[in-house]
Amino acid sequence: MIKKKAKGLSPFYRVFWSVAAALLLLLVIAVVLLRSFLANYEKALPKYAAKEVFEELFLSDDGYQKLGSEIHKTAGKFDGDTDFAAMASEILSGKELTYGEISDDFGDEKIGYAVRNDGHRLAIFTLKRSDKKLAGGYYQYVLDSVSLTKKAAALDITVPSGYELRVSGETVDDGYISGEKTISAASEHLPAGVSPLEYVTYKIDGIYGTPQIEVFDKDGKECAVSKKDGAYIAAPNENEALKTKYSGYITAGAKAFATYMQSDASFNAVKPYLIAGTTFYTQTYYVENYFVIDHDSYSFDNVSASEFYEYDENTFSCRISFTHLLHRAGLEDYKDYFDTTFIMKKVGDGYRIYDAFNN
């Protein structure tokens, strides 16, 4: 019996199935690549980076230490020692926080998100496109900056011209000076040709913490800083040598002037302290001091001599203040508050009053 030879696949089918297998392989590869492509695309979307940043910085249990550290990175130089972690804890703790993208203009390739509680913005963080790419050429988004929306303070600090200002340990340069120089109230009372004390005002915006303000004179000596109506004012340092030498003398002159004004002394009592021929001399001589409170005697309380400022080798000013008590038998004392700055000019070997004005 003769066996028939089995027929193999025809050339057509061999080609067909080879092509089909190749196409199937390509399809599988394409699907794998597409899934990888889509996964990288999804991973690169900024919303995932935003979620990660929000959870890491605002929902962590580290007491907002990471958040405070990130805020520090972009804080101003005058907030260098501000405890932003503590500030964040004070603002955010115990609140139900949400976040969402905002349309504020943060510049090219940046996206901003607001962290809110009950509809109120408490913080803002921004993402930026990094240089790092995922497979498929997609750029990753990373944290750019984060800040609290607490209103920052603006500092207004007036200091004597030429003095050094430091805020939180950082020297403030002249670029922060605002407006023109101003001069002291004594300027209108100084002798001709004597330059008054000049002041400059620094304005610094965006301070979040409680600033430490220090002012130093040209010799490196720190001076007193006070705050009035929200603004800081640094007083020039006194000339201690003048204060030591002339406090008693000028206080005696001020008391003589006060007793003369209350008709308890003649002009001769105050005359040795004045410079003849000046406007102040003439005004004092012709003052109408006849109508005063009736009293039997007088005394002085809370006497103070301060603010000894030298303008040149022949001129300085000082401030004398006290309470002038007028005593009346059987009645309460009348209190006359004396607070006057005297301009002292050198005459011979000593000084006399050139002019004066009330503070």
Image (cartoon, grey):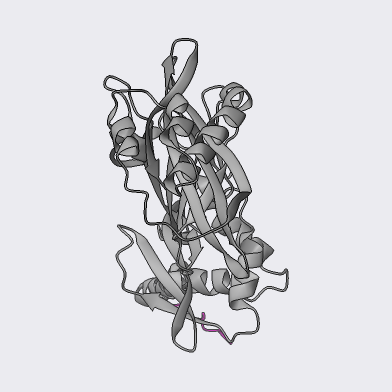
Residue 244 included in the magenta stretch of the image: no
Tell me where residue 189 sits by quadrant: top left
| Nearer to me, 51 or 249 | 249
Looking at the picture, how far across and down is residue 132, in whole percent?
A: 47, 52
213 up-or-down from 10: above or below? above
Residue at x-position 56% and y-position 34% = 252
Looking at the picture, how far across and down is residue 223, in whole percent?
A: 57, 36
Tell me where residue 153 sits by quadrant: bottom left
Residue at x-position 42% and y-position 58% = 128
Tell me where residue 277 sits by quadrant: top left
Residues shaded magenta: 1-9
From the viewer's perspective, is 75 left or right of 271?
Answer: right
From the viewer's perspective, is 128 left or right of 239?
Answer: left
Residue at x-position 45% and y-position 47% = 263
In this rendering, does residue 40 appear at all?
Answer: no
18 up-or-down from 119: above or below? above
289 up-or-down from 270: above or below? below
Residue 4 included in the magenta stretch of the image: yes
| Nearer to me, 88 or 239 | 239
Looking at the picture, how far across and down is residue 114, in whole percent?
A: 44, 75
